[in-house]
Structures are given as structure tokens and as C-alpha cells.
Image: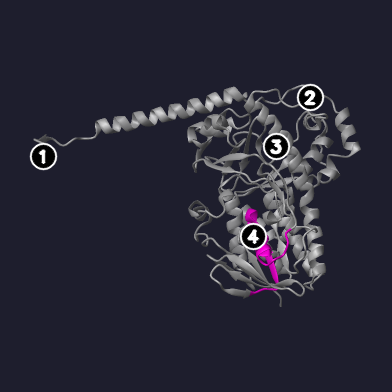
């Protein structure tokens, strides 16, 4: 029976273990971080530190694609997530009342998302995989190199950072954004195909909360989220499991005027000023359960080593973020990773011989999965970055030759068909080329009635900066006064000639 070694034990690696075990492979997962905590799920999530996966502490969602994969491939895991309080969100609830006929249509059953913290889903996945026969998960162990049979070439073994040699027929690179197979191949003398990259230019700030009751304080205007990507920043809220939710704010990196978003006071002031978010932040609605965490996103990257341009090495397969990274504002990472690893398992089951032909087929499949989303993210980010940069610099916003996005957004509010096609694209069900770029779609957008009620407006750039700066300064002043009061109120010992009495 072939043996698969998976380097990396986060979402892509654990899902890869689940998928490969289903087709009869013995699987060894090597994860450099310590094992997650045991115990009740919610308590374990609260105690689980992730220094090797900083993005794990930020806002995540599972799009309709991810839900479909779980329904078809891992229904038990989906059931466990539901039992843990993760909600299936019916996206058609967000269909605008002004969009005409709201009658359910074929395909609406796919328009669902899962409200679940990444840590909850990943911990459930970890526990599921650990219980599988034929699967072993080793923590505190990392892959440092590949051993290749150069005649083929093909994978023979991995070598850990401690020098241990582990034979392997198949190796999955699930090392995330580090994509360490690039280093392994280069060290083995294999030339690397170039990556495709495009800036994401995004710094994100996330905070988690817990509701006092199951009732939602406000609507989810985006179906699986509340908020939006506005003209100079983004503010988006995602429901989670156990009555939790997260708020993510995003700005251009290196924007000093908005550095106060790192503080609880500055973050709260911005979130409360953001359309659709304020009701969730009422004192009666919920309580913060984390501080504010900041992260700067890497560029959108489609790895050359994962695609058909790479000189193939039989048995080596980058998966998930090791194959492609896209802007986290779109929330597609986990869903695409799940889809990718199960498609890879299907391919390996159909072509079980570990050959260069198998590797070439996997490379073509990988680019089929990721390329449409890389290109969509790159194009959307270019437009967003230009708008945000103009807002920061105080210059006139760029005027694109054909501002399709603005007209599509308007048409989505008055035409239910346009709304569905856009939503299917945003939820990763239908690639842009099949949903929102065709002539029929453009015609429908052009003929859609103009909306008569504008959506809520976000604060202007100057107003947002003022709010977060004032909130931070007020909090700093209050903290200083509190320290001074405490110091003045502390008892002092009497002294005689410098000696304590």
C-alpha cells in the first residue's frame, strides 16, 4: 500500500489526510507545531495558540463551495461542526427586497455558507483525522528536504529537520504560504517555474466576540457576512460557532493614520461607524472574547511549482495555500483547499501509478482549480488598491475605462438573477468566466433598473481617521488617570530619618 507523507497539519494537510486515507493510502502527517489542546471544544479553542499559523486567529468563513465539499465528502465533519454550534447560513436571506421575484429557484439549495471559526473547524478536523485507521499525525516535526530518485525523477523519502529519513511514495506540500516544496526542489537541483504574483496590499485587524443570546443583532447583508468593502477601507463581520462572531477591518499597509485600529478603542470606534456592524457592538448584544490582532497579507500568488510549467517530480503535490494564495477578503482559502485536496485524491485514485504523467495531470487540475480565482482576486485588488491609495493621498479616485463593478453592484440590488450569479461567484461555486463576464450577463446588468435607495454610506476617510484617533487618545488618557488615581490611593509607609517605621 503506498505511503503518503503530508508536510503540514493545518486545514489543507488534515483534509489531505482525510482524502488520501479514503483511497487506501497510509498517511503520515508531519506538523511543526505542538498538538492542539484536548478537552471540551470551546475551552480547547480558547487555549490553542498558533504561532506558526498567525492567520488562524483572524476572521474566516467557509463559502458555499466549502459547504458543498463537506456535504459530499465529509458529511460527518459537517454534522460535528453543526453540533458544535456552527450555523448553516442561507444566503438567499440577503436577496434584496428590491430585486424583484424572491421565489426560490433551482440551485438556491447550494447558496449556503458555514458560520464557524477556523479554529473550531480545524480542531474538529484534527480530531477526525487522528481517529482514522491508517493515519498518523506527528507534531513538533518538520520536513527539511526531499530525497529523489533522479532517474525518474520521483519522490523516495522526506528528511526531517532532525535528520530522520522517512520513506514516501507521495508527498503533499501543505506548508501553507511558505510553500516549502520550492526550497526542497531548489536544494535538490530542480529548476523552479516562476510564480504569478500580484499585490494584495492589505493589513487586517480582527477581534472576536460572543453574543449574549442566539438572536442576531442585525442582518447579514452579504449572506454570510455583514459589512462591505468600501471606497477606502473594509469592514466585515462573520458569524461563528458557539454564538461567536468576528469583525475584520482592513486598510492599506503602512497607513499611519489608521494605526490606532490596533487598539481596542480605535478598533471599536471604526467598527461602530461601519454600516451594518454597529448593532452587533451594543453592550447588550455581546462581549469581546479576544484582543485585536493585526496581520499583513501576502501578495496574491499562483505558484509555478504547482502548475504545468514546473519540471515535474512524480509524487510531489503542493496543495492549498502552497499552490495558490488569494486575498483573504474574499474568504475562499479554506474552501478552495478542501476542494483541491479531494480533487487530487480523485485523480490519484483514477491514475494510481506514481509517474510523471500522473504529476502532469495533477498540475493541470491544480491550475484549473486556482487560476480563475487568482485572476479575479488580482484584478479586483488592482482596482481596490488604486481607490484606497487615492483616498489616503487625498487625490481624485481613478476612473476606470469601464467601471463594471459599480454597475454590477447596482444591478444586484434590482435584479434577482444578477444577484444570484454574483453570489455564486463570490461563494466560489461558479468561476467568473462562467457567471459574471459573459455578454448575456453584461446585457442583463445594463438593462437592470437603477436602484432608488442608496446603501448606507461608510464614514469618509477624514471622519474615520478622526474617530479612531480620538478614541485611542481618550482611552490612553483614561488609562493614565486610572494609574495616577491608583498610585495616589496606595498606602505609604511612614519613615523616621529615611528608615521605615
Pointer 1 residue = 499
Asked where in the image residue 344 lies, by quadrant, the reply is: bottom right
Nearer the camera: disc 1 or disc 2: 1
Location of the N terminus (image quadrant): bottom right
Q: Residues within 10 Å of mark 4 (few under 14, many from 20)?
A: many
Of residues 46 and 261, the one nearer the viewer is: 261
Q: Is residue 475 left or right of residue 340?
A: left
First along the sequence among labels 3 and 4? 4
Residue 136 on the magenta span: no
Q: Residues within 10 Å of mark 1 (few under 14, many from 20)?
A: few
Magenta residues, start to end: 167-192
Residue position marked by numbered label 2 in the rendering:
451
138 versus 462 height, above or below: below
- Nearer to us: label 4 or label 1: 4
Indicate the secondary structure of the residue bearing disc 2: loop
Q: Earlier in the sequence, mark 4 or mark 1?
A: 4
**Any mark on residue 180, and which?**
4
Amino acid at each position: 500500500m503506498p505511503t503518503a507523507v503530508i508536510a503540514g497539519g493545518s486545514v489543507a494537510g488534515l483534509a489531505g489526510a482525510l482524502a488520501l486515507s479514503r483511497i487506501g493510502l497510509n498517511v503520515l502527517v508531519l506538523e511543526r507545531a505542538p498538538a492542539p489542546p484536548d478537552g471540551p471544544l470551546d475551552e480547547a479553542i480558547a487555549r490553542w495558540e498558533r504561532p506558526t499559523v498567525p492567520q488562524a486567529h483572524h476572521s474566516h468563513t467557509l463559502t458555499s463551495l466549502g459547504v458543498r465539499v463537506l456535504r459530499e465528502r465529509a458529511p460527518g465533519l459537517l454534522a460535528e461542526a453543526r453540533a458544535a454550534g456552527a450555523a448553516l447560513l442561507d444566503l438567499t436571506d440577503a436577496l434584496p427586497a428590491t430585486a424583484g421575484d424572491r421565489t426560490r429557484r433551482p440551485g438556491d439549495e447550494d447558496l449556503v455558507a458555514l458560520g464557524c471559526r477556523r479554529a473550531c473547524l480545524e480542531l474538529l478536523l484534527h480530531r477526525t483525522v487522528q481517529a482514522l485507521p491508517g493515519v498518523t499525525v506527528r507534531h513538533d516535526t518538520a520536513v527539511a528536504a526531499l530525497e529523489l530518485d533522479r532517474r525518474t525523477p520521483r519522490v523516495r523519502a522526506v528528511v526531517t529537520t532532525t535528520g530522520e529519513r522517512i520513506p514516501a511514495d507521495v508527498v503533499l506540500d501543505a506548508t501553507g504560504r511558505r510553500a516549502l516544496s520550492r526550497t526542497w526542489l531548489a536544494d535538490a537541483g530542480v529548476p523552479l517555474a516562476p510564480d504569478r504574483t500580484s499585490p494584495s496590499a492589505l493589513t487586517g485587524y480582527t477581534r472576536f466576540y460572543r453574543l449574549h443570546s442566539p438572536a442576531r443583532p442585525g442582518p447579514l447583508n452579504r449572506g454570510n457576512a455583514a459589512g462591505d468593502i468600501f471606497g477606502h477601507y473594509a469592514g466585515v463581520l462573520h458569524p461563528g460557532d458557539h454564538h461567536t462572531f468576528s469583525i475584520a477591518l482592513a486598510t492599506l499597509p503602512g497607513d499611519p493614520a489608521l494605526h490606532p485600529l490596533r487598539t481596542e478603542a480605535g478598533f471599536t470606534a471604526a467598527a461602530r461607524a461601519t454600516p451594518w456592524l454597529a448593532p452587533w457592538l451594543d453592550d447588550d448584544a455581546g462581549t469581546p472574547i479576544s484582543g485585536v490582532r493585526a496581520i499583513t497579507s501576502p501578495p496574491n500568488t499562483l505558484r509555478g511549482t504547482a502548475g504545468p510549467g514546473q519540471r515535474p517530480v512524480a509524487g510531489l503535490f503542493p496543495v492549498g495555500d502552497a499552490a495558490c494564495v488569494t486575498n483573504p477578503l474574499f474568504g475562499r482559502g479554506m474552501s478552495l483547499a478542501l476542494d483541491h485536496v479531494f480533487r487530487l485524491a480523485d485523480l490519484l485514485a483514477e491514475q494510481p501509478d506514481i509517474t510523471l504523467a500522473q504529476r502532469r495531470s495533477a498540475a493541470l487540475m491544480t491550475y484549473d482549480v486556482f487560476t480563475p480565482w487568482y485572476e479575479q482576486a488580482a484584478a479586483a485588488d488592482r482596482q481596490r488598491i488604486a481607490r484606497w491609495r487615492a483616498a489616503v493621498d487625498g487625490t481624485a479616485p481613478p476612473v476606470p475605462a469601464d467601471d463594471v463593478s459599480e454597475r454590477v453592484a447596482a444591478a444586484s440590488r434590482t435584479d434577482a438573477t444578477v444577484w444570484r450569479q454574483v453570489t455564486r461567484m463570490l461563494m466560489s461555486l461558479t468561476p467568473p468566466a462562467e457567471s459574471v463576464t459573459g455578454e448575456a450577463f453584461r446585457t442583463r446588468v445594463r438593462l437592470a433598473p437603477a436602484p432608488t435607495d442608496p446603501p448606507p454610506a461608510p464614514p469618509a476617510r477624514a471622519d474615520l481617521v478622526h474617530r479612531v484617533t480620538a478614541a485611542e487618545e481618550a482611552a490612553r488618557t483614561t488609562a493614565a488617570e486610572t494609574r495616577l488615581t491608583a498610585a495616589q490611593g496606595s498606602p505609604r509607609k511612614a519613615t523616621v530619618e529615611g528608615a521605615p517605621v
